[in-house]
Image (cartoon, rainbow, N blue to C red):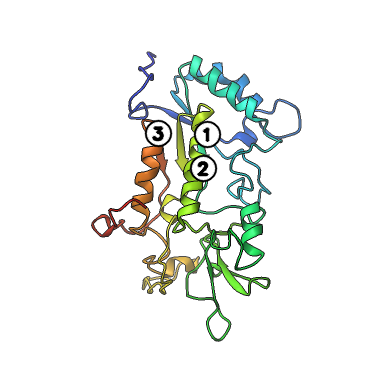
């Protein structure tokens, strides 16, 4: 099969992109888990299939409560998967074969073991105190609103140190970053530049419509399902905890940083983002 020209432009349009779940793809050192050197050893095979890009699932340092989507270091590679030099070798070899490399990036939340969260949870006055979504309890001690976590239960966890709740859209081990904070947004953009500098050709943005929330923390209204779903998460209209118009200016900044590289957003939503209501200033 003739390979299309992948040298530039919007190469991903019409391209065949192969997802690599790294942990189970190819083990190079017999520890029972796939790794970057194992993937490198299979690049000729993948190129021979006719694929044009590889989307690699998370390989960053993580306690692995959620298959690596709980990141504890945004600029590192978990030793079980290899090193930064392995990634450089991977991108170089892939490009020689005409393959593009897309990596999974998680900017909605981090691991609870990330140094940012450890510092943020230590007190309300620190430099990173506002880097995560914190809120006071209601007068009766209950969570600040009715938001529910995607993986079950309420979307808030109590911190006895700060005497506040922190928000988590998924597991309690995945606290939500506060992307209303300009410093956090700037840091995310710097991290994007770091990985582009290592030769990656695109990013898959995990749960991109979860980046922002309603700053007023208003309750979600009921969804009025005809039949109660197995997960009560689906019994609410997701008006205030995701798919917020405030997300769009930040995505525009991400697009500027990416330039002509690929950005692919994962979006799980029962409604459209209100583009007309989005603020047009730089986010």
Location of mark 3 (residue):
262
- Mark-to-mark CA distance, 2 and 3: 12 Å
Where is 190 relative to 116, above or below?
A: above
Disc nearest the viewer among 1 and 3:
1
> What x and y, as percent, mark residue 270?
35, 59
Instruction: Give the residue displayed 43% in from the left and 64% down from the top.
Output: 241
Disc nearest the viewer among 1 and 2:
1
> What x and y, as percent, mark residue 29?
74, 27
- 257 and 45: which is toward the camera: 257
Where is 122 relative to 211, above or below?
A: below
Task: Determine whether the residue tagged by mark 1 lies in a helix, strand or loop.
Answer: helix
Q: Earlier in the sequence, mark 1 or mark 2?
A: 2
Location of mark 2 (residue):
105
| Label ID, residue 195 | 1
- Mark-to-mark CA distance, 1 and 3: 13 Å
Labels 1 and 2 touching (C-beta < 8 A)? yes
């Amino acid at each position: 099969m003739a390979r299309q020209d992948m040298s530039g432009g919007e190469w991903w349009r019409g391209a065949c992109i192969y997802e690599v779940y790294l942990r189970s793809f190819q083990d190079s050192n017999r520890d029972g888990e796939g790794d970057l050197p194992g993937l490198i050893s299979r690049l000729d095979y993948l190129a021979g299939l006719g694929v044009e890009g590889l989307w690699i699932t998370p390989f960053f340092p993580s306690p692995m409560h959620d298959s690596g989507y709980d990141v504890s270091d945004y600029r590192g590679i978990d030793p079980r998967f290899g090193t930064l030099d392995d990634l450089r070798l991977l991108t170089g070899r892939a490009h020689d074969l005409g393959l593009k490399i897309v990596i999974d990036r998680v900017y909605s939340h981090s691991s609870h073991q990330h140094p940012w969260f450890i510092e943020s949870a230590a007190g309300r006055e620190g430099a990173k105190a506002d880097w995560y979504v914190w809120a006071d309890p209601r007068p009766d001690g209950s969570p600040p609103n009715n938001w529910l976590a995607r993986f079950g239960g309420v979307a808030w966890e109590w911190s006895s140190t700060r005497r506040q709740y922190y928000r988590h859209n998924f597991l309690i081990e995945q606290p939500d970053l506060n992307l209303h904070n300009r410093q956090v947004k700037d840091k995310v953009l710097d991290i994007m530049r770091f990985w582009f500098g290592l030769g990656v050709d695109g990013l898959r943005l995990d749960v991109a419509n979860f980046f922002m929330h309603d700053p007023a923390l208003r309750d979600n209204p009921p969804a009025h399902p005809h039949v109660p779903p197995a997960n009560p998460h689906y019994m609410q209209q997701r008006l205030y905890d995701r798919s917020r118009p405030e997300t769009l200016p930040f995505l525009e900044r991400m697009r500027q940083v990416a330039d002509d590289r690929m950005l692919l957003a994962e979006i799980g939503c029962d409604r459209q983002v209100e583009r007309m209501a989005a603020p047009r200033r730089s986010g």
